[in-house]
Image (spheres, coloured by chain):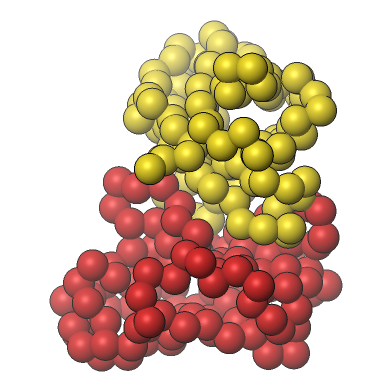
Chain colours: A red, B yellow
Amino acid sequence: GAGVSQSPSNKVTEKGKDVELRCDPISGHTALYWYRQSLGQGLEFLIYFQGNSAPDKSGLPSDRFSAERTGGSVSTLTIQRTQQEDSAVYLCASSKPRNEQFFGPGTRLTVL
Amino acid sequence: DQQVKQNSPSLSVQEGRISILNCDYTNSMFDYFLWYKKYPAEGPTFLISISSIKDKNEDGRFTVFLNKSAKHLSLHIVPSQPGDSAVYFCAASASYGGSQGNLIFGKGTKLSVKP
């Protein structure tokens, strides 16, 4: 498909474990964003990539969260030592310069 | 401190009538505004946008109005259809085009259109 894809679609993990979430942006989109939506909340910005660099990491809630992007394409969001408050839907979006963002279906993370 | 506020968590409208979804913002640097629609278990889908140089943008049944002095925008859906039932998110950016930076989202308004 031509859209943004994310994997896994669902992830259940135990508190204290590390998780990796993957995002495949639309081909040709240089900008990539990670957001999360906690229960009853709006979308919360986490990090923005332009190419492989991240000029804006201001939304990462703690140093347990990190993200990388390789080859100007796939991005991985890693959460170390997960906590219950990390439970949320993690959404990835991509865009061309000066265009609207297209979102993937999200990864639902549940930390037990 | 919420920079983008959608004060109505839900809205119920009869099919064929107008749906009006409201959004307020506090940051005067915002110059690009978007509406996204979200169905359960799917990512948000872009609906319509408006830049701060305009006060109205129309696309089919969807019209977005921007009142910069009031820091308020609204989305009008006319006529409303049952398939419009979804959560609608208002978003804002401090530069034209989402790829210049992150979008700040409101908490969403759940629209229910009843047949």
Give residue B66's position: percent from left, percent from top.
67, 21
Q: For the point 78% across and 69% down, which residue is it?
A: A29
Does residue A59 sit above or below B58 in this rendering? below
Q: Quadrant of the C terminus of chain A?
A: bottom left
Name the residue at the front extreme: B28
Q: In screen coordinates, is B74 left or right of B8?
A: right
B64, B93: nearer the viewer: B93
Q: Position of residue B34 (x, y in %)?
A: 65, 39
The quarter of the displayed image where residue A47 is located:
bottom right
In front: B63, or A98?
A98
Quadrant position of the N terminus of chain A in the picture: bottom right
Q: Residue at x 65, y 39 (%)?
A: B30
Number of numbered discs present?
0
Residue located 57% across and 22% down the image: B72
The answer to whether residue B37 shows anywhere in this view is: no
Q: Is residue B76 left or right of residue B19?
A: right
Q: Residue furthest top?
A: B17
A30 or A3: nearer the viewer: A30
Is any part of residue A103 visible from this angle? yes
Residue B111's place in the image compared with B18, above or below, is below
At a point 54% along the width and 9% down the height, the residue shown is B17
Front residue (pair A9, A32):
A32
| Above or below B85: residue A41 | below
Give the percent coordinates (x, y) of residue A17: 25, 90
Q: Position of residue B96 (x, y in %)?
A: 77, 46
